[in-house]
Image (cartoon, rainbow, N blue to C red):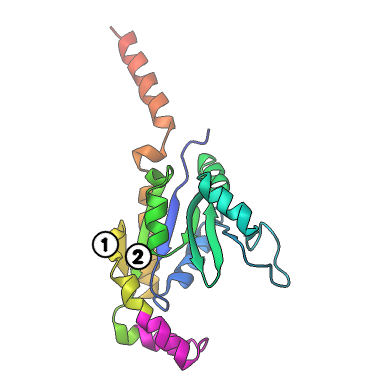
Amino acid sequence: MADRRGLLIILSSPSGAGKSTLARRLMAWDEGLEFSVSATTRAPRPGEEHGREYYFLSEDDFRQQVAEGQMLEHAHVFGNFYGSPAGPVRESINGGRDVLFDVDWQGEVQIRNSDLGKHALSIFILPPSISELRRRLETRGQDSEDVIAKRMLKSWDEISHWGYYDYVLVNDDLDATEDKLKTIVSAERMRRIQQPSLQNHVRSLQNEFEGLS
């Protein structure tokens, strides 16, 4: 067994708050950090490979895995199922490797309530203001005005669930928020439950102490 267990690091935010950029920076900071590969029932797009972008499953297989408890979280989005397979995540954290999840608050709740939830670390990223959130969506130039309007309508529902999370960061300065994120992850890796080797160490201390008498 590894000296420590890995963390299930959950990052959530409304679109435009900086979550994707922070996730990329976190993975660049620690190249051992793994990104959770989701399963989906949608068809592969050109260039996508099973097990790399997604695990591509039939709807029957997906439903069966959900029924058997093999999905940490799952959702039905735009006519397709998406979910996080538990097997690869369990293998990673038992090997001492952290796994990064990009899920919404509903996914966070499902992961938290799973048998691996005790190893979860959830962080919500807030924008400094709603006007700044809209400005970021507009300046990145990826969406039409109609899409931006829909994202803004959805943003408050996401923000309203900030209380589900272990940590909440206001991303008013990207570099400062990145530093805080690294500090949180570094500290959480040292939680007692994440260090299974401590039990053997304490036992050896006990044996040594008893040998003195």
Q: Nearer the viewer, residue 21 or 59?
A: 59
Comparing labels 1 and 2, the label whose residue is closer to the camera: 1
Specify the farthest residue to the top: 213
What amino acid type is highlighted by mark number 2?
A: Phe
Q: Nearer the viewer, residue 187 or 163?
A: 163
Span of residues in magenta: 133-153
Residue at (52%, 39%) from the top-left corner? 94
Which residue has dot 2 on it? Answer: 124
Residue 119 lies, in percent from the top left, at 41, 45
Relative to 205, say whether 143 is above or below: below
Check the picture and name the quadrant holding the C terminus: top left
Within the image, what quadrant is residue 164 found in? bottom left
Relative to 2, say whether 108 is above or below: below
What amino acid type is highlighted by mark number 1?
A: Gly
Q: Nearer the viewer, residue 201 or 167?
A: 167
197 part of magenta stretch: no
Residue 46 lies, in percent from the top left, at 73, 72
Instruction: Give the mark count.
Output: 2
Disc 1 versus disc 2: distance between alpha carbons? 9 Å
Is 116 positioned to the left or the right of 34 in the image? left
Within the image, what quadrant is residue 38 found in? bottom right
Relative to 125, say whether 36 is above or below: above
Q: Circle 2 — which element?
A: strand
Specify the farthest residue to the right: 47
Query: Mark 2 packing: few (<14 Cα in 10 Å), some, or many (20+)?
Result: many
Residue 147 lies, in percent from the top left, at 47, 87
Which residue has dot 1 on it? Answer: 163
Q: Circle 1 — which element?
A: helix
Query: Mark 1 packing: few (<14 Cα in 10 Å), some, or many (20+)?
Result: few
Residue at (40%, 54%) from the top-left corner? 110
